[in-house]
Amino acid sequence: MRGWIVTGNLTPPDFATFWSQAGQQGLKPKIATIGKALLFPSSVNAMGERGNGLTTEVWWTPTHPFKSGLTGVTPRQLCDGYTAASGRQWTPPIGYKHAIFEIAIDILKRAKSLDPQGVLEGIRTTDYNSIVGRVKWTGSPVKNITKTPLVAGQWQRRNGKFDLVVTTNAPAPEIPVGGPLQMLPT
């Protein structure tokens, strides 16, 4: 069967089982886009060549055009440092792990006091440019929520390994596209 589009939000083990069994049954969709399961390179690598061309939402990459308001480090520098220190490939949550500390320090610096009300006021007045983009909890249609850019990407084999490549940036044109969307191999 060809011409299908598969989409879902599964855990890595559940999607790996589905993807393996779908392949055994001859399901060959044009596109498969899965949230959660395709967040980490290790999950995609575990699928072997069947991981090539899978698509997912992309929260953050080394090519995002932001920098840390705390350290000045760029996404590329953060990812390169992570890879050098750990020997592992970058993952989208790395930027958010850094940003949470940036934002917490910014809140504490601006808090009029360290009692709960002072810290709460610091949180409420946050308007901060972080390594994952602008964080601001006011002015949104939903109270106490901030949005960061979300784009779409695809796991593509490059230089012998899978790399998460931004393929569509319509919701956030400031995020650079790294390559075109490719149909899944037949």
Image: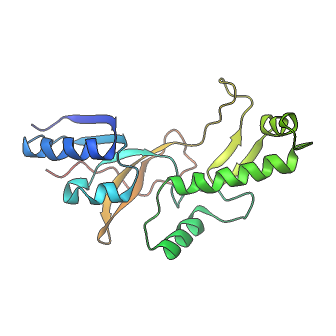
Q: Is residue 29 left or right of residue 140?
A: left
Q: How are the colours assigned in the image?
A: rainbow
The answer to which of 179 and 78 lies nearer the viewer is 78
- Which residue is most to the front? 115
- Residue 24, how many percent across, how many down? 8, 45
Which quadrant of the figure contains the N terminus?
top left
Residue that appears at 73% across and 64% down: 71
Question: Quadrant of residue 135 in the image?
Answer: top right
Q: Is residue 151 left or right of residue 143?
A: left
The answer to which of 99 and 163 lies nearer the viewer is 99
Residue that appears at 48% across and 72% down: 86
Q: Is residue 134 above or below residue 98?
A: above
- Residue 63, how many percent across, how many down? 53, 60
Q: Is residue 84 left or right of residue 53?
A: right
Q: Is residue 98 above or below residue 2?
A: below
Q: Is residue 35 left or right of residue 51?
A: right
Question: Quadrant of residue 76 in the image?
Answer: bottom right
- Which residue is most to the right? 112
Residue that appears at 69% across and 54% down: 101
- Residue 27, how many percent across, how many down? 12, 40
Q: Is residue 108 above or below residue 138?
A: below
Residue that appears at 64% across and 48% down: 133
The answer to which of 6 and 173 lies nearer the viewer is 6
- Which residue is most to the bottom? 84
The number of callouts visible is 0
The answer to which of 24 and 175 lies nearer the viewer is 24
- Residue 138, how many percent across, how many down? 75, 31
